[in-house]
């Protein structure tokens, strides 16, 4: 702590102002960015503790469940993201210090370059990518520490956090393969028993995920490896966008300095560990896979997150002067980006297209929407994003999704039983009057009530009489079953059967 205080004391006024402004803008984003649909979706996971969930492995749900035992506040949930960025910066400092060439000052500058970077700025909302990044960097740090110290506690912690990284998102699997390759490449220098223990602990996490999938319709596997790739087609624009995204996340200035540096960027005099080689092994597999993916699919900004974070360790070869300039460049980049985003948030009604304005009020004026909705009674929306956001804002756990055939956000399938609703009256919120036609066929009659949210936005509350389950099963549930709950024939049989299929007699 004293070393950090001493380092901060060496910053000039300009650098301190940039650091302070970055932190203030990041806090402003935490406070001002409306609850996103995905963020609300993960919060609902935390309210329904499970061994796994439809879309992804369960770690983010476990984290939000634990946080929910303390408080149910959006700022509290987002504090995880904020402090994760702080902790990751510290872990990068510790990784850099494991290189025999790096001084404390160099390590502090590398950590600060990450902390004020656009990557760190993204740590505003707590989602599965946030949890993945923290557990992945913790896992790599303790893996490196275990190699360096050969302490069994570090070995156990490495296995635990790497296992949790896998249980955060499948992207971690490529990092794990990279670490395994590193272990095999340098096996003569490593304690093989300790490496095997790390592998065994990670395999326990893999087994947990496989057990969940084998007892829950292979949900994660089907979603991530089948449903999400069915619309694949070649697009060179996606490839160029991916390469440009990596350059921006790693910092154009930092990459330029790496290209022109005369320092030896790989070799280290350390007998036990070379942090640069370690992070290259851990990062390159995922970046390579995503490059191949980019030939047929657009790559999300958050997909390469763990790789670009770990690669900040490579900047330890830069001179102190270069690192100072990198910190300044990253800080200005992030400050400009944060300012633009905050201005956009204040002008959202002017910037958003007219066709999308109706959707915005769910997120920007939820209190007005909730005022029109049933307090403790069930109601439905037409998508998981609005369903999750309104469930959180309205404090109603009985908000569900109706008539959705989307591959996204199908966790609500576990929480609803439309067969039991046959003949009943259902309340449905729609954002466009024309959407009434989507639900009309499933009821004998509809009563549509306008909800004036603001001068430009009117929502509609539908009261549908005598729900027709048989038609709903034919038009919605059977297509959903065929697309998202039916594994290829070569998949192993599901232990206990698929609950979705059993519930609606779709076996």
Image (tube, grey):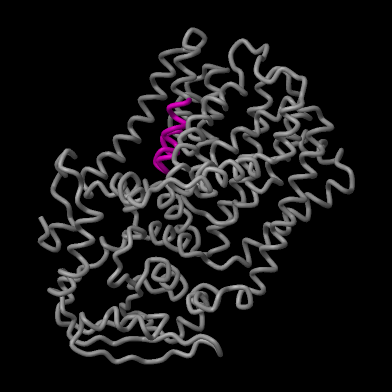
Q: Is residue 275 above or below residue 392?
A: above
Q: Quadrant of residue 354?
A: bottom right
Is 17 placed left or right of 481 in the picture? right
Q: Quadrant of the N terminus?
A: top right
The magenta region covers: 162-178
Furthest-right residue in this view: 13
Is 101 placed left or right of 352 in the picture? right
Please state which of residues 149 and 283 is positioned toward the viewer in this rendering. Answer: 283
Q: Residue at x 72, y 36 (%)?
A: 254
Q: Quadrant of residue 372?
A: bottom left
Q: Residue at x 56, y 74 (%)?
A: 353
Residue 248: give x, y in percent of width and height: 65, 44
Q: Is residue 62 magenta?
A: no
Q: Main secondary structure of the magenta part?
A: helix
Q: Quadrant of residue 460?
A: bottom left
Residue 330: give x, y in percent of width and height: 74, 45
Residue 121: give x, y in percent of width and height: 65, 51
Q: Is residue 166 magenta?
A: yes
């Amino acid at each position: 702590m004293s070393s950090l205080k001493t380092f901060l004391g060496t910053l000039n006024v300009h650098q301190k102002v940039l650091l302070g402004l970055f932190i203030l803008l990041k806090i402003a984003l935490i406070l001002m960015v409306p609850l996103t649909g995905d963020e609300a979706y993960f919060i609902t996971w935390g309210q329904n503790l499970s061994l796994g969930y439809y879309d992804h492995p369960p770690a983010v749900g476990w984290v939000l469940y634990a946080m929910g035992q303390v408080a149910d506040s959006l700022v509290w949930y987002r504090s995880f993201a904020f402090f994760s960025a702080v902790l990751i910066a510290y872990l990068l400092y510790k990784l850099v210090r494991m290189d025999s060439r790096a001084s404390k000052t160099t390590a502090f500058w590398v950590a600060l370059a990450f902390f004020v970077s656009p990557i760190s700025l993204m740590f505003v909302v707590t989602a599965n990518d946030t949890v993945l990044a923290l557990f992945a960097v913790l896992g790599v740090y303790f893996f490196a520490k275990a190699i360096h110290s050969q302490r069994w506690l570090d070995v156990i912690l490495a296995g635990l956090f790497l296992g949790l990284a896998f249980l955060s998102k499948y992207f971690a699997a490529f990092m794990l393969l990279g670490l395994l390759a590193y272990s095999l490449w340098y096996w003569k220098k490593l304690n093989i028993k300790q490496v095997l223990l790390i592998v065994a602990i990670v395999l326990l996490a893999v087994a947990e995920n496989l057990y969940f999938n084998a007892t829950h319709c292979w949900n994660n596997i089907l979603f991530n490896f089948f449903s999400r790739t069915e619309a694949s087609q070649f697009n060179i624009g996606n490839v160029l966008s991916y390469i440009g995204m990596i350059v921006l996340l790693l910092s154009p200035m930092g990459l330029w300095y790496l290209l022109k540096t005369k320092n030896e960027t790989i070799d280290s005099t350390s007998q036990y560990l070379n942090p640069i080689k370690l992070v290259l092994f851990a990062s390159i597999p995922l970046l390579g896979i995503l490059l191949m993916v980019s030939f047929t699919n657009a790559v999300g900004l958050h997909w390469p997150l763990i790789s670009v974070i770990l690669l900040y360790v490579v900047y330890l070869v830069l001179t102190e002067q270069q690192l100072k300039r990198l910190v300044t460049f990253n800080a200005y980049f992030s400050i400009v980006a944060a300012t633009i985003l905050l201005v956009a948030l204040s002008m959202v009604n002017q910037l958003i297209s007219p066709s999308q304005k109706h959707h915005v009020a769910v997120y920007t004026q939820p209190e007005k929407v909730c005022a029109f909705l049933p307090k403790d009674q069930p109601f439905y929306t037409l998508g998981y994003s609005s369903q999750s956001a309104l469930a959180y804002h309205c404090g109603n756990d009985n908000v569900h999704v109706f008539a959705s055939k989307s591959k996204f956000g199908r966790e609500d399938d576990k929480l609803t039983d439309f067969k039991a609703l046959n003949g009943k009256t259902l309340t449905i919120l729609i954002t466009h009057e024309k959407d009434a036609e989507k639900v009309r066929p499933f009821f004998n009659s509809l009563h549509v009530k306008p909800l004036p949210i603001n001068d430009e936005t009117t929502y509609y509350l539908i009261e549908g009489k005598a729900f027709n389950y048989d038609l709903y099963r034919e038009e919605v549930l059977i297509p959903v079953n065929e697309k998202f709950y039916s594994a290829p024939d070569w998949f192993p049989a599901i232990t206990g059967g698929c609950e979705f299929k059993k519930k609606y007699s779709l076996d």
